[in-house]
Image (cartoon, rainbow, N blue to C red):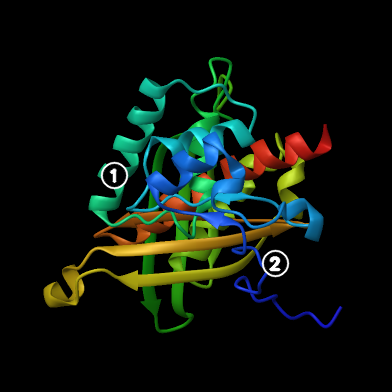
Amino acid sequence: MVNLKLDEHTPYCGHSAFAHKGGIHVAAMLKSRDSYQHIDPALVGNEMRSVISELSGRGNIIFQAQAMGIDLNREDAQRVLNHIKHLEHEGFTFEAAEASVELMLHRLRPNYVHPFELIDFFVITERRQSRGLLSEATVKIKVGDEIKFTAAEGKGPVNALASALNKALTSDYPILETVRLTDYKVRILDSTTGTASATRVLIDFKSGTESWTTVGASPNIIEASWRALSDSMEYALVRLAKSEV
C-alpha cells in the first residue's frame, strides 16, 4: 500500500524465511521437510523454496523441478547442475536470478518450444553535434517460421536493444506490452583487469503481480545485457502464459 519493498529476510513471512541453499541441506529436506523447518511455512502464508548457488547439489535442482511439476531424473539434474557451475565460472550468479534457473528447467521439457530464436543483433552508440548522444539497435530473430528484422532508438544501448526486441515480439505476443523493467544492475567481476573485466548484469521485470530476475555475464556489457534481457522475455512468455491458464 505504501509502495515499499518488503524485507526479504523478515522472520516467518520474508521471502527468504524458508529458503534452503546447501546441497546436503536440501537433500535432507527432500527426505523429511521437518528436518530443517520448525513449522510448516503454509501456516504463516509462506512457502518453502530452494536457492541455486555455488553450494548447490542435485537436490536443489530436483527440488525446483518438482515445484514446477517437472519429473527430473538424477542424470538430468546433474547435467543442469554442471551447466550452472560452468556458467558461474564465467561470472553468472543464480542465487538472485531464480527465473534464469527456472527457464533452464522449462527447456528440458520434451515438448518445449522456444518462443523466439536470436539470429543477429547490432548496437551502435554515437555522438552527433546536432543531436548529442544517439543509441540505435537492430535485432533479427526467428519467431516460428518467420524471420523478423526490427530497429529502434533508445536513451542508451541497452534501452535501444530492449526496444528493438520488444518491437519484434509484441505483434506475436501482445502480452509483452504489460511487462515493465523495474531494475537494472551491473557488477564488475574483476577490477584488476580494468575496463576489460567481465561484467554481470541482473535485470528485474514485472507484469501485474508477477516479478522475476534474470542474469547475464560477459566481458562485453552489451552481450551480458542481451543474455539477461532475452531470457527475461522468454521467461515472461512462459510464466505469463502459464498464469493465464
Quadrant that contains the C terminus: top right
Q: Judge by depth and name the residue closer to the eye, 111 or 51.
A: 51
Left or right placement of residue 192 versus residue 174 in this view: left
Residue that badge 1 annotates: 85
Callout 1 touching callout 2 (CB < 8 Å): no
Q: Which is more N-terminal, label 2 or label 1? A: 2
Task: Name above or below for residue 18 compared with residue 56.
Answer: below
- The amino acid beneath tag 2 is Tyr
At horizontal 54% and vertical 28% (from top left) the residue drawn is 114
- The amino acid beneath tag 1 is Lys
Q: Secondary structure at mark 1?
A: helix
* Rendering coords of residue 173 (x, y %): 71, 38
Quadrant of the rendered structure where residue 15 is?
bottom right
Q: Secondary structure at mark 2?
A: loop
Task: Name above or below for residue 31 compared with residue 95.
Answer: above
How crowded pointer 2 is (Cα within 10 Å; few <14, some 14-19, many 20+) is rated as some
At horizontal 72% and vertical 51% (from top left) the residue drawn is 40
At horizontal 30% and vertical 65% (from top left) the residue drawn is 199
The residues bearing labels 1 and 2 have C-alpha atoms spaced at a distance of 31 Å
